[in-house]
C-alpha cells in the first residue's frame, strides 16, 4: 500500500472520529424529540409528512405495533419496486424504451433494495429505466437505511426503557 493510500485512510478515520460525538449527540436529540438547530427548517416539513401520512407523532407504539408498522412499510416497498420494474415499459422517463424487467429479476431486485442488500444481477442502464432507477432503486437505498436506523433506535429504547411498554413510533423514527 502506498503512503498516499495510508494517508487517505488516516485522514478518513480522523474525520469520522471527529464527527462521531457531535453527530451522535445530534441524533440523540432528534430521536428523543428534543429541539435542535435544524428544527426551524425541518420541523414544518416533518409535521407536513405526519399530516399527509395520518401519523400522530405523540402516540408511541409497543413492540408489536412497531414491528407491524415496519413489516407493512417493507411489504409496500417491495410491491412498489416490483410494480415499477414490471410496468417500466409503459411508464414515462424511459427514453431507451426498455421493456418490463422479467418477473424473477424484478422480485429479486425489489426484495434486495427494500432489505438494503442492493444485490444486482443486471446492468442498470441496460435494464432499468430512469424512473425505475430514481423512484424505486435510489429511493429505497435511502428508505431501507432509514428503516434500519429506526430499528436501531427502537432497540436502544427497548434496552433503556426496560420497564416501559412502548419503544417509540416507527413512522416518526422513519421520518426523523
Image (cartoon, helix red, strand yellow):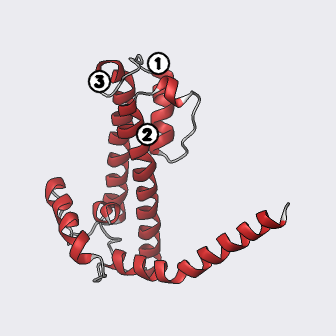
Taking the image as shown, residue 176 lies to the left or right of residue 57, namely right
Between tags 1 and 2, which lies in front? 2
The secondary element bearing badge 3 is classed as loop
Task: Judge whether 27 appears above or below 122 on screen.
Answer: below
Q: Where is residue 147 in the image (x, y as percent from the top left)?
A: 41, 56
Q: Are marks 2 and 3 in contact (CB under 8 Å)?
A: no
Kindly identify which residue carries mark 2: 137
Between tags 1 and 3, which lies in front? 3
Mark 1–mark 3 Cα distance, whole angstroms, equals 16 Å
127 and 172: which is toward the camera: 127
Which label's residue is closer to the chain start, 1 or 3? 3
Which label's residue is closer to the chain start, 1 or 2? 1
The secondary element bearing badge 1 is classed as loop
Mark 1–mark 2 Cα distance, whole angstroms, equals 16 Å
Mark 2–mark 3 Cα distance, whole angstroms, equals 16 Å
Task: Judge whether 42 appears above or below 97 on screen.
Answer: below
Q: Are marks 1 and 3 in contact (CB under 8 Å)?
A: no
Task: Judge whether 109 appears above or below 44 on screen.
Answer: above
* Label 2 Cα crowd, 10 Å radius (few <14 / some 14-19 / many 20+): many
Kindly identify which residue carries mark 1: 102
Give the residue displayed 25% in from the left and 76% down from the top: 39
Locate the N terminus by quadrant.
bottom right
Taking the image as shown, residue 44 lies to the left or right of residue 75, namely left
Residue 91 is labelled as 3
Q: Where is residue 80 in the image (x, y as percent from the top left)?
A: 33, 35
Task: Judge whether 121 appears above or below 35 on screen.
Answer: above
Residue 38 is at least partly visible in this image = yes
Q: Are marks 1 and 2 in contact (CB under 8 Å)?
A: no
Give the residue displayed 33% in from the left and 48% down from the top: 73
Amino acid at each position: 500500500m502506498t503512503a498516499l493510500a495510508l494517508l487517505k485512510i488516516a485522514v478518513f478515520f480522523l474525520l469520522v472520529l471527529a464527527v462521531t460525538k457531535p453527530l451522535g449527540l445530534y441524533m440523540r436529540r432528534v430521536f428523543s424529540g428534543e429541539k435542535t438547530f435544524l428544527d426551524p427548517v425541518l420541523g414544518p416539513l416533518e409535521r407536513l409528512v405526519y399530516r399527509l401520512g395520518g401519523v400522530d407523532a405523540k402516540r408511541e407504539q409497543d413492540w408489536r405495533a412497531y414491528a407491524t408498522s415496519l413489516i407493512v412499510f417493507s411489504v409496500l416497498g417491495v410491491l412498489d419496486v416490483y410494480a415499477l420494474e414490471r410496468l417500466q415499459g409503459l411508464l414515462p422517463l424511459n427514453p431507451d424504451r426498455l421493456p418490463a424487467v422479467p418477473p424473477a429479476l424484478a422480485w429479486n431486485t425489489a426484495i434486495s433494495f427494500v432489505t438494503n442488500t442492493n444485490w444486482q444481477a443486471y446492468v442498470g442502464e441496460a435494464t432499468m429505466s430512469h424512473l425505475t432507477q430514481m423512484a424505486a432503486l435510489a429511493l429505497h437505498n435511502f428508505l431501507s437505511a432509514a428503516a434500519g436506523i429506526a430499528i436501531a433506535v427502537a432497540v436502544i429504547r427497548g434496552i433503556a426503557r426496560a420497564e416501559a411498554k412502548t419503544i417509540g413510533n416507527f413512522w416518526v423514527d422513519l421520518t426523523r
